[in-house]
Structures are given as C-alpha cells and as structure tokens.
Image: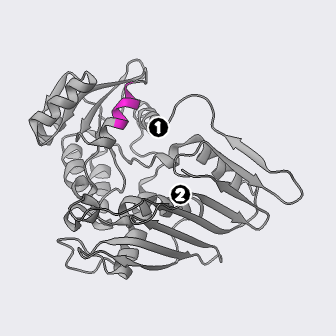
Amino acid sequence: MAGTSGSRAVRWGILATGGIAASFTTDLLEMADAQVIAVGSRRPESAKRFAERFGISRAYGGWAELAADDDIDVIYVATPHSAHREAAGLCLEAGRAVLCEKPFTLNVRQAEELVDLARARGRFLMEAMWTYCDPVVRRMTELVHDGAIGEVRAVHADFGLPGPIDPDHRLRDPALGGGALLDLGVYPVSFAQLLLGEPDEIRAVGQLSPEGVDVNTGLALGWDSGAVALLSCSITADTPMTAAVTGSAGRIEFPRGFFHPERFVLHRPGRDPEEITAVDGLRSYQWEAAEVMRCLRAGETESPLVPLDGTLAVMRTLDAARERLGVRYPGEDEGLV
C-alpha cells in the first residue's frame, strides 16, 4: 500500500535477523505508532528465535513469505548489501513499501533497478540513511543553506574501524560486497553530498586485501564551484570518526560519531563558538522510522529527506571510486562507470 491511515500504528516486517535488524527493532518497539508484526529469514530457526526475542507474532522461514503478508505496511531490509537488490526487489514486487539498509545496493545498476521498480509500481522506497533524518544534521544543513558559514569550501569526514579483520569476515568477502568503502565510506560520501551534491571529479587511493576488497581508502572529491571533500574509510584503523564543514565565513565541527550526532559546534569569526545539541525526543533509528511512517501516512512514495535521486548519486560516486581502486565484485564483468 502506498499510504497508511494516521489512526493506527504502522505495521512493520523485518527482513533478516542480524545485529542491525535487532538494533532497529529495539528502537521501533519503543515507538507508540509502530508495530512489528512479522520477521522473515532464509533460516526458519533464525526467524523463530528473533520473533521470540522481540515478541513478534509471525516468523517466516523465507523472504517471499514475509513479502506476501498483506497485513504488513512496510518492510525493513537488513540483509548484507549484497542481497539488497534481491530482497528489496522481492518486497516491492509483492506490493510492500521498503526501507532498505545502506549501502543501498552493490552498485548503481542495481540501485537504478530498485528505484525504477518502486516508481513503476508506485511503492514507497527509501535508503536507511539515518544521518539524513537526524535533527542535528538537519539543523546543520539549514544553517549551511542559510549562509551561516558562507560558501562551502571543504568537507572533511572519516569512518574507520580497528583491525585486524579476519579473512573469513563478511567485510573481506567480495561475494558479500566487502571492503571499507561500501560499508563505512558511504557515510562520509553521503555527508559530503548532502551539502554539495554529486561531485564533478572523483579521485581514490587505497590498499586492497588479498581477497581484492579495499581495507584503507582515501577519497578526494571536487566540484566545479571550487569546493572539495577529503574523506577516508578503513577497516584497519580506528579513525576519529569526525566531520567538519568549512565555509568562506566560518566552519561547523562534529565530534566523534558524526553520522548520528548529538551536537556540533558552529565557529564564526568575531563570535564565541556556538554549540547546537540534540533535541529531546526520538533517538537513533527512530528518526528514520518516523520519516518512513510520516511518508506512508501522507501517501508519499519518496522521502524528501532521503530522496532516491540522492541515493543514486551516492551510488555513482561509490562506483567511480571502486573503479579507480580496482575493486570488482562477482558478476561485475563490465566497467562500473
């Protein structure tokens, strides 16, 4: 269904049972206007355990069975991104609205297929980029667009996890879309493009694992306006995980955890630093869930906070960066860009 009545809770299905599915479900269950009524997994025992853990009434031992449940308003796809095209596509084909985890897909070709399918069917689809829904980030973008720091000249952001990562871990498995760029780099790239749009120039350098995925990557993005972004991601080093936006008349600095921040500091010449903090209310995944439910109740098939065209633009940047790094996944025989 394209929308849902504001008089009742939105009914969610959860597709996959891993750690992020558990975290999202935990937050969702605390929202009065949301109900989690079903979970689906390719392993029936996994779905049953997840359902018992969270008090979910329906446990399906297959994605198709979950997607076929007409009582579900929207399905949250929480599989590894290598399965996003299949899982989200199955749900859209069955008539469900979809919130799909990031990165949206393995590559822009798959992303375009999902977007085309959703638009053709008139179904809601959104990437689960919680950063874009966070009120602190939204306040930052308002300030930037209102000229609080002048014209944006540079964006800096990083996201790195300490190694070593075992060779059999999904982050090093090409078949699962492994590497730092898609799993972690999507955050700095999305942050930069939220402010500056799709870059006009993309450069990438990095180290590849023996399996052929990137483990330590740096990106330099450029725009015809003269703005630049210096971004990095790693699965070999615990980076600061901070971000900064520098303009011609000031700068904004985010502390560790810029992708779900509680505050930022606005610096402007001749003024004391201003700290902007989180508003009381929702937290973490609840902000993106609230945006999904708002869209469904309003009959919107795309979110203005996380527009599908923006998701496609980020995927094009990630594809271009992987092409420069020489990272290809199984089935990507042709050039990415």
Q: Which mark is residue 241?
A: 2
**Residue at 30% over, 42% down:** 19
Residue 26 position, x and y percent, is: 37, 30
Q: Nearer the viewer, mark 2 or mark 1?
A: 2
Hey, what amino acid is under mark 1?
A: Glu
Q: Pointer 2: residues within 10 angstroms few (<14), some, or many (20+)?
A: many
Going from the N terminus, do you reach mark 2 or mark 1 first?
2
Asked if residue 27 lies in the magenta stretch, the reply is yes
In the image, is 42 to the left or to the right of 141? Answer: left
In the image, is 330 to the left or to the right of 146? Answer: left
Hey, what amino acid is under mark 2?
A: Met
Q: In the image, which residues are magenta?
A: 23-29
Residue placed most toward the observer, 241 or 189: 241
**Residue at 42% over, 30% down:** 297
Residue placed most toward the observer, 152 or 236: 236
Type of secondary structure dominating the magenta stretch: helix
Q: Quadrant of residue 295?
A: top left
Q: Residue furthest front?
A: 164
**Residue at 15% over, 41% down:** 63
